[in-house]
Image (spheres, rainbow, N blue to C red):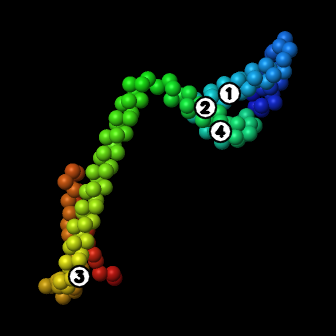
């Protein structure tokens, strides 16, 4: 592995000294840099670390990262992509259902609070007014919790 872009470029120039065009040499060196950067990405090295390790400009590494991700996605079989899209769609539907359930719960609690405040519900034991709390239970997991309004201490 080459520590700097210059070291890699120098190596490539010596390796391809038979090639007369400097443009061809630069293109080849650029391809080898991309190859080395892609290898690092595949190993899990973060783009910011690649900048430091290879002494490359951040914008260059950013473009290589974008290319790497796009090319990696191209290698996924279409059946796998469709499966992922289907699962994502299912998750979106579940999230929408949960949002509706949460809105319904808040609506119920607001109704209780409004009723408690409007009618000035009074506790028959302590005489306080307007403080209402309910024990609610999740219909899926069975866990219980308190929801309501408490007097500040």
Q: In the shown orientation, is residue 76 left or right of residue 67?
A: left
Closer to us: 146 or 116? 116
Residue beneath label 1, please? 34
CB of mark 3 within 8 Å of CB of mark 4? no
Residue 92: mark in rendering = none
Secondary structure at numbered mark 4: helix
For the C terminus, which image quadrant?
A: bottom left
Residue beneath label 2, please? 67
Closer to us: 21 or 41? 21
Q: What's the CA distance linking mark 4 and mark 1?
A: 11 Å
Quadrant assignment, res 5: top right
Q: Nearer the viewer, mark 1 or mark 2?
A: 2
Q: Is residue 126 visible?
A: no
The local crowd at label 1, few if under 14, some if 14 to 19, many if 20 or more residues have their Cα within 10 Å, is some
Coordinates of residue 111 in the picture (x, y in percent): 22, 72
Coordinates of residue 22 in the picture (x, y in percent): 84, 21
Residue beneath label 3, please? 117
CB of mark 1 within 8 Å of CB of mark 2? yes
Name the residue located 61 percent from the left edge and 39 percent from the top edge.
46
Name the residue located 60 percent from the left edge and 35 percent from the top edge.
66
Residue beneath label 4, please? 62
Q: What's the CA distance linking mark 2 and mark 4?
A: 9 Å
**First along the sequence among labels 4 and 1:** 1
**First along the sequence among labels 1 and 2:** 1
**First along the sequence among labels 3 and 2:** 2
Q: What's the CA distance linking mark 3 and mark 2?
A: 60 Å
For the N terminus, which image quadrant?
A: top right
Coordinates of residue 63 in the picture (x, y in percent): 65, 36
Q: Is residue 6 visible?
A: yes
Secondary structure at numbered mark 2: helix
Quadrant assignment, res 39: top right
């Amino acid at each position: 592995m080459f520590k700097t872009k210059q070291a890699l470029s120098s190596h490539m120039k010596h390796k391809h000294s038979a090639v007369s065009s400097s443009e061809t040499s630069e293109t080849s060196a650029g391809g080898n840099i991309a190859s080395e950067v892609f290898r690092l990405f595949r190993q899990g090295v973060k783009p910011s670390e690649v900048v430091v390790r290879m002494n490359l400009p951040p914008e260059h590494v950013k473009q290589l990262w974008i290319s790497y991700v796009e090319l990696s996605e191209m290698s996924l079989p279409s059946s796998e992509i469709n499966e992922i899209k289907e699962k994502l769609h299912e998750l979106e539907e579940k999230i929408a259902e949960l949002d509706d359930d949460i809105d319904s719960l808040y609506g119920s609690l607001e109704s209780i609070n409004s009723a408690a405040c409007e009618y000035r519900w009074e506790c028959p034991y302590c005489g306080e007014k307007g403080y209402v709390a309910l024990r609610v239970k999740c219909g899926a997991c069975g866990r219980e919790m308190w929801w309501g309004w408490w007097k500040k201490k």
